[in-house]
Amino acid sequence: MQGKVAVVIFMAKKDVVERITNVMNKPEQIRNVATSSHVHHGKTALTDNLMGGAGMLSEKVVADTESGMFTWFDEQERERQLTIYGANVSMVHKYDEKDYIINLLDTPGHVDFGGDVTRAMRAVDGTIVLVCGVEGIMPQTETVLRQALRERVRPVLFINKVDRLIRELKLTPEMMQKRFTKIIDNVNVLIRKYAEDEYKNKWTVNVADGSVAFGSATKRWAISIPYMKKTGLTFKDIVDLTVQGKEDELAKKAPLHKVVLDMIIKHLPTPKEAQKYRLDKIWKGDLESKIGKDMLGCNADGKLAMIVTKMVPDQHVGFVATGRLFSGRLSKGTDVSLISQHKTEKIQQVAIYKGIQRIPVDEITAGNIVAIVGISDAFTGETVTNAGHVMEPFEEIKHLFEPVVTKSVEPKNTMDLSKLINALKRIGREDTTLKIKINQETGEYLISGLGELHLEAKVERKLKTMGLEVEMSKPIVVYREAIFDKSPIVEGKSPNKHNKFEMMVEPLEEAVYNAMKEGQLPSDVEIKKKKLDLAKKMAEFGMDYDEAKHVILVYNKSVLVDLTKGVQYLNEVMELVKQAFKTIIDEGPVSREPCTGVKVKLLDAALHEDPVHRGPGQIIPAIRRTLRSALLRANITLLEPKQIVRIDIPEELIGTATREVENRRGQILDIKTESGATVITAKIPVSDIFGFDDSLKSATSGRGFYSTIEISFEKLPKDLREKTIKQIRARKGLSEQIPSAVVEE
């Protein structure tokens, strides 16, 4: 692959980088855009086309799965014929006699790699939503559009694979028009469903204004109504040229890159425009502060404010960070502060992207997406500013789905243990949707991901390429512990009996919990000073305002509320109380699975006047013991993860598919039949879905396939509860006896 890339780069126009550097300090001539779609709907082929049109690829290799697909830089991507790692490309396009920079992020379409989409959406202001003209709207189309709108990223639409409608399905222009209308209407339904009120109608896509284009990424042509009016090309011409096999001629008359890049420039916002309405969504600092005003105005001469959206390992420099600059400027040698890490680092290189190639530049200013060498300690979501400057960090980048599939890993050779630990840390920083945890009791290294393919592609294969031979367990399901009643007030004492705490627990209000899931409320935040705006927002979702004012910690969609009054020395031990609260939320009392949706109230405390008697060894065990006892008295049980899936099959195979679902404790939610094809919506427990894809393909002779729509957590059935808890406890090296309401430390 490296050889092919070298040839492609050699073919690129010499002046591309020069043209980019000439424009990068003009925010009105910059567009930051991501591709987004269901898997196999053509994002990478589209990216190839846009790069080819910008003079960065030869026409001979554009969208060719062997020599093209420039942003597939990992060999697995060619093997699997899908994008696994998102990639960045900066290109330049002339529109109305002006050069414009398009910073394009090509993203994966498979649900297991959706974390890359979420991270990309923080960096961009607009997205090209691709929909296959043959398949139409699919589950991941809805998911990625939902992710974009949650970050206030504006969409345009490209309906791809139109050549297949003409050649394979032999649709007439009238039939195609009906199909296009249906797809556009469905996309607009999703925009109105997931966009905030202000943008529900403003951001819908429209054929007439050119925010919708049609075409074929593999055949390199596209069309839109404005382009048809401008050139006189008709849809009949497109059909005729396709039927006659003259698609090279069509690509010259209606080049895809021109139509799509024109659409991007005309309909998607500049960084200056977007930051005005995006900032209060992704940053909760004071908009009237100096840094707030700098970011709102995309001020290149203001204080530096950047968020890291990607960390990529590099064998020569450690890690390369990708970030979006909201204000200020960056150049080689600049000292910067990593806000969350409380560290100062020196920038060694700033660069723009061209696929896997970085092009060093002297300086990059606000509004751009930048590659940085020198901040290897950063992580995805880190806030970067000028050295010595302190600012409110950007909001956490949170994926829609939680990791629900876990495997344990250990090296075949015990001498490789330290190598494995370093490799896992590296992989975890590269993809923050992978959760890596060391189980202290069993010595297991546990890795949780969004699905089996996620773990296989980004962990198992990655470790092999690093030269590590490891043993991976079969998939383990991660459950949640949740309560369904209020507990009584529980009193707990420290081991020395000199400190006493009174606590109770109750379920977090459902609307508050759902708002945390949807990103409308923070699900992990430490509140040092009273945040009345956050309290008001929590109250809007149903929490008592007096309680909301006293929330001091939100962690894993659970809250700690301090309702004590006038307790002496409490401030001195509060960090220990929070630490103990986190350990119980991480490992609940029933099976040491994470707790979720819990409201913990600290009601009263009596503390010893001598600090020696209220140290960590006293306070932490007291809080843990009290909390465990309270949780066990609040009707605590296990929630199991379930996948809501869409199954596409021929109509005559409905019975076969429903049997496969029901054999896995699944539930059929809906069955729709259209034009001889059937779509089944079903809910299947994650514990029973392993191997479902192979079973479905086997039962339907390869004619059935499924994709994930959503992940939910529901009560584990009573008849499975005891057996499941005992299995989890045995795996973790705990006694099989299920704890009662009185818990000893």
Image (cartoon, rainbow, N blue to C red):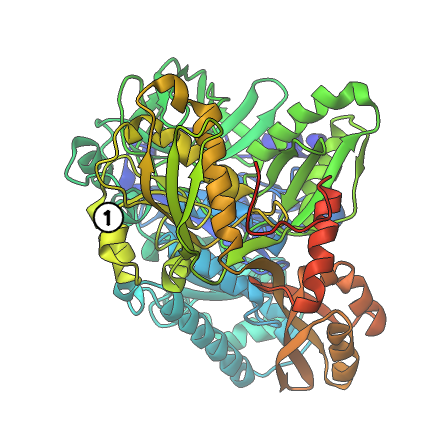
Does residue 414 appear in the picture of this structure? yes
| Snapshot quadrant of residue 157 | bottom left
Image x and y of residue 466, in percent:
74, 27
- The residue nearer to you, when weighing 309 against 212, is 309
Image x and y of residue 632, in percent:
53, 53
Image x and y of residue 618, in percent:
46, 27
**Is residue 484 rendered to the left or right of residue 302?**
right
Which residue matches tag 1? 549
Q: Which residue lies furthest to the front in this view?
A: 497
Task: Look at 60% across and 56% down and name the residue there.
Answer: 111
| Snapshot quadrant of residue 11 | top right
Q: Is mark 1 on a helix, strand or loop?
A: loop
Does residue 262 appear in the picture of this structure? no
Image vertical order of residue 181 relative to residue 645, above or below: below
**Is residue 399 rendered to the left or right of residue 693?**
left
Image vertical order of residue 567 relative to residue 115, above or below: above
- The residue nearer to you, when weighing 285 against 8, is 285
Task: Look at 30% across and 59% down and name the residue there.
Answer: 543
**Quadrant in which the N terminus appears:** top right
Task: Look at 55% across and 24% down and name the residue there.
Answer: 319
- The residue nearer to you, when weighing 80 against 615, is 615
Report how many numbered discs are placed on residues in the image. 1
Task: Look at 50% across and 40% down and name the residue there.
Answer: 625
**Is residue 203 rendered to the left or right of residue 664?**
left
Disc 1 crowd rating (10 Å Cα; few below 14, some 14-19, many 20+) is many
**Is residue 402 rendered to the left or right of residue 340?**
right
**Quadrant in which the C terminus appears:** top right
